[in-house]
Image (tube, rainbow, N blue to C red):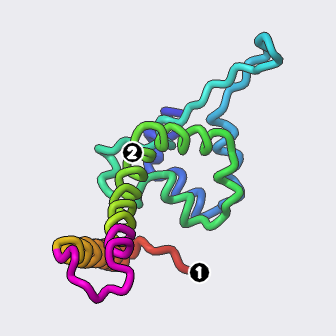
């Protein structure tokens, strides 16, 4: 597998573009199943997914990585393959879960600010907690600006998938 990916750097992208049906065959070649069964009817499996995972130094833009190329193929069934699932599982465990939790905590803070402001002043007429309203407005505005910037950057780089 290493020699194949060294000779053809964008192998997944090219196969996905030219003949997406062969991606399944390529992924099957990245698995090795042992003939021996371990206790509990388990089979030892080796995954050769280093090139599928993508080196962050080689793929500065994550949309050029082999997994991203699979997104552009448009076949969701390819993500059910054990090699792809293992690769995604590793990425989720190493950094995906942390990034997801950080983003969700940002929205949780917005929800807590809104809830606290509404509970302390349900009509929204009194000026009990003016600092809370200012914090809520700043947080909501900052959220909107960040989302618009990220969306604009992704659109300008053609990182949005459309059919």
Image quadrant assignment for residue 140: bottom left
Secondary element at image label 2 = helix
The reply, left or right, for residue 84 in relation to residue 59 is right
The answer to whether one can see residue 143 in this image is: yes
Sequence-earlier tag: 1 or 2: 2
Q: Quadrant of the N terminus?
A: top right
Rendered image: mark on residue 98: 2
Camera-side residue of 138 and 34: 138
Location of residue 11 in the rendering, given as x and y in whole percent from the top left corner = 52, 50
- Residue at the bottom extreme? 125
Q: Residue at x 67, y 63 (%)?
A: 75
Rendered image: mark on residue 139: none
Q: Quadrant of the C terminus?
A: bottom right
Let me know if residue 122 is in the magenta part: yes
Camera-side residue of 71 and 110: 110
Which tag is nearer the camera, tag 1 or tag 2?
Answer: 2
Cα separation between marks 1 and 2: 31 Å
The magenta region covers 115-130
Secondary element at image label 1 = loop
Q: Residue at x 54, y 66 (%)?
A: 72
The reply, left or right, for residue 11 in relation to residue 145 is right
Image quadrant assignment for residue 149: bottom left
Camera-side residue of 25 and 82: 82
Q: Residue at x 56, y 58 (%)?
A: 70
Let me know if residue 156 is in the magenta part: no
As drawn, 110 above or below 100: below
As drawn, 124 above or below 26: below
As drawn, 58 above or below 132: above
The answer to whether one can see residue 157 in this image is: no
Image quadrant assignment for residue 26: top right
Label 1 belongs to which residue?
A: 163
Location of residue 139 in the rendering, given as x and y in whole percent from the top left corner = 25, 71
């Amino acid at each position: 597998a290493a020699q194949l990916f060294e000779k053809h750097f964008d192998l997944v992208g090219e196969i996905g573009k030219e003949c997406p049906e062969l991606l399944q065959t390529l992924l099957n070649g990245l698995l090795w199943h042992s003939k021996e069964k371990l206790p509990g009817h388990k089979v030892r499996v080796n995954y050769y997914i280093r090139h599928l995972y993508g080196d962050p130094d080689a793929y500065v833009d994550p949309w050029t990585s082999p997994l991203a190329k699979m997104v552009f193929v448009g076949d969701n069934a390819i993500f059910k393959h054990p090699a792809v699932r293992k690769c995604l599982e590793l990425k989720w465990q190493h950094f995906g879960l942390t990034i997801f939790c950080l983003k969700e905590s940002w929205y949780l803070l917005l929800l807590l600010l809104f809830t606290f402001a509404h509970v302390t002043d349900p009509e929204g007429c009194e000026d009990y907690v003016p600092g809370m309203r200012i914090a809520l407005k700043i947080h909501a505005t900052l959220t909107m600006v960040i989302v618009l910037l990220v969306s604009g950057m992704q659109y300008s780089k053609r990182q949005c998938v459309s059919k």
